[in-house]
Amino acid sequence: MNKIKPTTDFTKVKPYNQEEEKTVQLARMFNTISDKYDKFNDIMSWGMARVWRKQSLLALKKYNPKQILDIAAGTADMCIKSYQYLNPEHVTGVDISAKMLDMGRIKVANANLTDKIDLEVQDCSNLTFANESFDAATIAFGIRNFEKLDESLKQINRVLRPGGHLLILEMNEPQKGLLFKGYQLYTKVFVRMTAKYLSSDKIAYDYLTASMHAFPNGERLIEIMKKNGFKLNKYRKFTFGVCSMYLVQK
Ligand SMILES: C[S@@+](CC[C@H](N)C(=O)[O-])C[C@H]1O[C@@H](n2cnc3c(N)ncnc32)[C@H](O)[C@@H]1O
């Protein structure tokens, strides 16, 4: 049984307890699983996360962004792939988990991109960058973790130049039918087995599936983005709708 109670209020889906701020708990949780995250992500998505990152990033190519901000950068996959697919001048990655970024720095160094990619500990709801600093921002598998969603979207809007793009990639829980049943079984059995196999923080994996259940997707998320100053450019579902891409513009 999942110890995290099912709820539709995503701000209440917290990994460890209801008292502490969600962001504080998440930084701790991602610090704990940072050395296992890439393997878990690959196993859980059957390697599809790499394909989804690439396909979504290619939607930005025609806008030729030169300064890119990757939010919830984690272990820097999106930063590295942004650089490789979009050839910008610079990519800045931010995340609340210092240890995820430490893993990312190793990958950035191995890719010989230390002068092209910077990684900084920052909370998306409180970015320190000047207004209109970036041509594009990206968030892959991160937005459903944001404790302060409206504030975060407002901050992204502030740091983007007028006409700049925000690309979001996020997992969805199938809504109904066989896919829904299959998905529930998959998360209950497979996620647990994977967490056990990686002998990592089991609560973290429960959180990752519970947060998917609670987070608004599709039209609901698009409405929230519109409310915070963005207009929709492109919405695309990948792989039977288990992952969605939203491209919105300031
Ligand atoms: C599932 S990981 C995604 C990592 C990476 N983008 C990828 O494609 O694999 C989610 C990341 O969001 C970060 N995160 C959660 N809340 C955040 C916030 N408020 N601001 C910045 N990063 C945050 C976590 O620390 C974690 O590294």
Image (tube, rainbow, N blue to C red):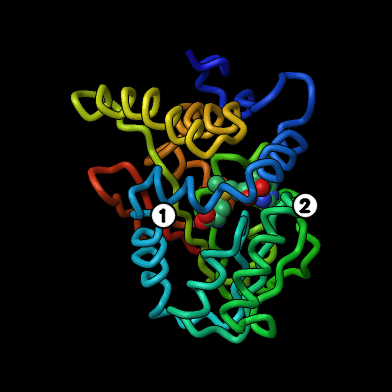
Q: Residues within 10 Å of mark 2 (few under 14, many from 20)?
A: few
Mark drawn on residue 246: 1
Whole-percent x and y of residue 167?
48, 61
Name the kind of residue labelled 1 in the image. Tyr
Q: Residues within 10 Å of mark 1 (few under 14, many from 20)?
A: many
Q: Which residue is mark 2?
A: 126
Name the kind of residue labelled 2 in the image. Asn
Locate residue 119 relative to residue 60 in the image: left or right: right
Whole-percent x and y of residue 91?
62, 75
Whole-percent x and y of residue 131?
74, 69
Residue furthest out toward the left: 178
Q: Considering only vertical position in the picture, is 130 above or below 66?
A: above
Q: Residue at x 54, y 40 (%)?
A: 144
Q: In the rendered image, is residue 39 in sight?
A: yes
Instruction: Determine the secondary structure under disc 2.
Output: helix
Whole-percent x and y of residue 30?
66, 43
Locate residue 102 relative to residue 49 in the image: left or right: right
Locate residue 27 relative to residue 71 in the image: left or right: right
Q: Residue at x 71, y 32 (%)?
A: 22
